Image: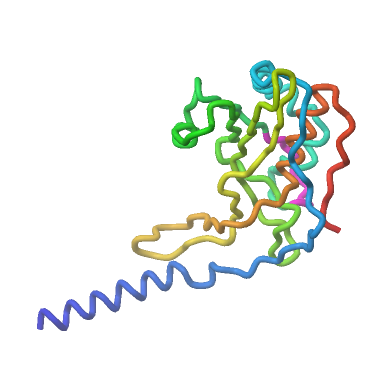
Amino acid sequence: MRTSNFKILVVAFLVIIQSCNSNVIKPIDIKPFPDKNIPEYNFNWNVNKLKDTIVSMFNIDNQVRDPILNSVFYFTTKGGDTASGQRMPITFEPETIKDSLFSKDYFSKPNTANDIYLHDFGICWFSKVYFLNNKPLEYRAEFIIKLVKINDDSTRISIVSENPRVINGTLSGMGPCGGHIARETSVEATSIEEYSLLLFIAHKLGVNSLPALKLPD
């Protein structure tokens, strides 16, 4: 009798789990984007001076006024890329090894002392590459600005994404899933966000020779 009751509980649990995950994994449409941006550039700056300068330029006023950042990093109050809601810019918070809060795990890795970690407290923006039913998916990631000393007066900057992901449906149902929880799907970095950040830095430093931002057709 006990064995029979246990089997019933197991079956019931599996049914609940299935209900939590039913119809939530939806196929993502990926816009063709073969000619990616290259988010890397050599600046004629000392690495330490450049690092301090970049940290200082990531203030709210600089970011919300930048047309390149505003064209990529935003959300609307009603959701959806073409919604009639108010357009809200997204800004990033820079952290270094000296003042790491959300980036402690990252700066515990080797060869990160010169890096700058950017996060936006988990706010999503609309992807220009990943879609579902012809609507852009919400996308988010953290970013690493890597500074590598070439010589005393030259530094290579490259920008990489950390854990890029999209919101692809929800987990819903009764039992352990509770109500509705956004389901995150890991995706490949697009190069759009990374290069936008590089262009922002370059323009603030007075370097206007970088190619324009490339986007999918």
**Where residue 121 sits: x, y (%)?**
55, 36
Q: Residue at x 70, y 43 (%)?
A: 75
The secondary structure that most of the magenta stretch takes on is loop
Q: Residue at x 43, y 65 (%)?
A: 173
Q: Is residue 4 above or below residue 190?
A: below
Q: Is residue 166 above or below residue 100?
A: below
49 horizontally vs 71: left or right = left
105 horizontally vs 36: left or right = left
Quadrant in the picture for the C terminus: bottom right
Residues 146 and 70: in front is 146
**Where residue 82 sits: x, y (%)?**
79, 52
Q: Which residues are magenta?
A: 81-90
Residues 184 and 151: in front is 151
192 horizontally vs 145: left or right = right
Q: Residue at x 51, y 25 (%)?
A: 97
Instruction: Judge whether residue 47 can be spotted in this image.
Output: yes
Residue 3 on the magenta span: no
Residues 20 and 146: in front is 146
Residue 82 on the magenta span: yes
